[in-house]
Amino acid sequence: MSETISLLVINPNSSQSVTAGLREVLSPPPGVVLKFYTAPSNAPPSINDATTGVLSGAACFADIQAKNLIDEYDGFLVCCFSDHPLTHMLRENTQKPAMNILESAVTQSLLIGQRFGIITTGTGYKYIHYTEVRNFLGATSERFAGLVTTGLGVVELREGDRQHVEKKVKEGSAKIAAKGADVIILGCAGMAGMEGLVRQGVVEAGLPPVRIVDGAKAGIQILAGLARLAT
């Protein structure tokens, strides 16, 4: 492997606006090059449940294999806030590091605060996320303050009415901070760059300040280190 680390940032849904949001906010560490990938058109435009997760994983993996991208990159970040199937497909087919943004966000949160909470999209995926967090931690933990859903869609975050989106994000942030979280995780790749809204929602609710974790930003840093260790 060359001295420069090349990471593939994967948006596993087919919405270009989500990829554009990731491109806007992600900066590579020194010696790292980021390339951005959007799922092919036959993948779902958003990932809202187990069905769309599996469909997006299958579509992306077939496309990644056809393009020989596994050989081309040193690490893979799956930008879906879930235990996305593509993460495990990649791990089965390469020893190069692969992770999703749920894993990276929880990892960083445990190191910078006492209790973390999650603000995310939709409504129906909520209890799957609880299971995924518990599975990653290996047990239930008092350090997980819980999760709040905004009712917003993934694509709506990037393309919807801005006032409505901002209102829902701020309300959700206040709710999870009120549950005792001193770290709030942005629980969707479409929330990239929304740290200011989360912070504002907490302040406006008169609650103590919180730290905010973007799993995509955390993932880039962690993956870069893992890829270097693999050399």
Image (spheres, rainbow, N blue to C red):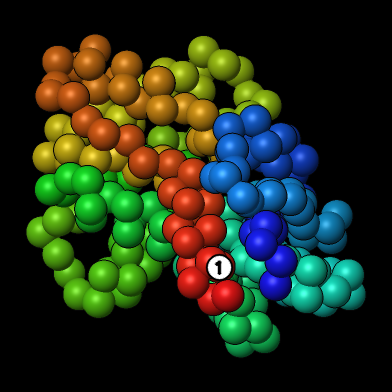
Residue 110 in view here: yes
List the single residue furthest toward the bottom. 92
User: In terms of image quadrants, where is residue 134?
Assistant: bottom left
List the single residue furthest toward the front. 3
* Residue count near mark 1 (Cα–Cα under 10 Å), binned few <14, some 14–19, many ≥20: many
Say left or right for 63 vs 2: right
173 over 103 or under it: above or below? above
Q: Which residue occupies the foreground of this view, 224 or 140?
A: 224
Q: Which residue occupies the foreground of this view, 202 or 45?
A: 202
Q: Which residue is mark 1?
A: 227
Residue at point 30%, 30% (across, down): 173
Residue 12 in view here: no
Residue at point 88%, 70% (across, down): 67
Question: Residue 220, position in %: x, y?
Answer: 53, 52
Q: Which residue occupies the foreground of this view, 161 or 83?
A: 83
Say left or right for 189 vs 64: left
Question: Residue 5, position in %: x, y?
Answer: 65, 59
